[in-house]
Image: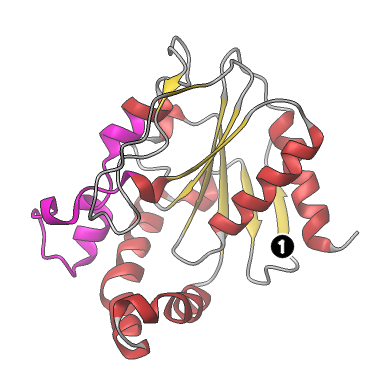
Amino acid sequence: MEQRAETLAELAGVILAVHRPHPVRVAIDGCSAAGKTTLADDLGQVLRARTDRAIIRVGIDHFKRAAESRTAYPRDSPESYYLDSWDNAAIRDRLLIPLGPGGDRRFQAGIMDLRARAALNRSVQVAPDDAVLLADGVFLQRPELDPYWDLRVYVDVSFDEVLRRGVARDQQWIGSAADAERRYHTKYIPGERRYLDEVRPRERAEVVVVNEEPAKPELLVRI
């Protein structure tokens, strides 16, 4: 079995070993372009092949605040990115608390489209008690959200790799490679450095996936 498949299989085993009387809420945390979404999607497939439990996939980018409402800081600042881009109250109240202790299991998987331009009309879903939530996004161990996760997975890459992958991925919608690189240098990477300095998510996560080489991710488990 090649290394990525082995890592995914081991990580799936770690998740399935977590037992709660409510859905297990797993955070797939990490910087921009770390490979969180691909990892979570692939992990979901592995879990579905190994268990009959419901696997709920949520991208936390669907909980961004409407672009026009982010007025607390200059739009292109790291503060706007880190402090004003996500609706943490909605993540907590519409997704994590309903799936947690005493929750009614009625949750929403998102409130906005990925560009945060239009509200989503997603219906309320009901999760079984033994479901597994795989939620990927940045800043998931912020103090507003951290108490509501049952397992924290941090996808770790260097900022050089964040820049390389991010520019390649985002240059089309930002406008050009130069514009994308500028935005990463002035907004995204400084905001993520602040998160790493203040929260220390790599050190606090129960599981770290070193994803510098996506074909050969390395797993560090602390539980």
**Residue 68 percent location from the top left of the image:** 12, 55
Q: Residue at x 83, y 54 (%)?
A: 6
Q: Amino acid type of disc 1? A: Pro
Query: Which quarter of the image is occupied by the N terminus?
Result: bottom right
Residue at the image position 30 percent from the left and 63 percent from the top: 191
Nearer to us in this view, 26 or 106: 106
The stretch drawn in magenta includes residue 146: no
Is residue 9 positioned above or below 188 on the image?
above
Was residue 90 drawn as part of the magenta stretch in this picture?
yes
Please identify the residue farthest to the top as the structure is shown: 102
Image coordinates of residue 190 in percent, x first then y, are 31, 69
Q: Nearer the viewer, residue 213 or 199?
A: 213
**Label 1 SS:** loop
Q: Is 160 left, or right, of 91 in this rendering?
A: right
Name the residue at 47% across, 17% down.
105
Judged from this view, the residue extending furthest toward the right is 1
Residue 110 placement (x, y as % from top left): 37, 39
Q: Mark 1: few, some, or many residues within 10 Å (few <14, many ≥20)?
A: many
**In front here: 42 or 30?**
42
The residue depicted at 61 percent of the width and 24 percent of the height is 131
- Residue 200: where, in percent of width, then height? 44, 51
Total labels drawn: 1
Q: Nearer the viewer, residue 107 or 164?
A: 107
Give the residue at mark 1. 217
Give the residues drawn in magenta, as a range.
Answer: 63-92
- Can the viewer see residue 221 in this picture? no
Asked whether residue 189 appears in the rendered view, the answer is: yes
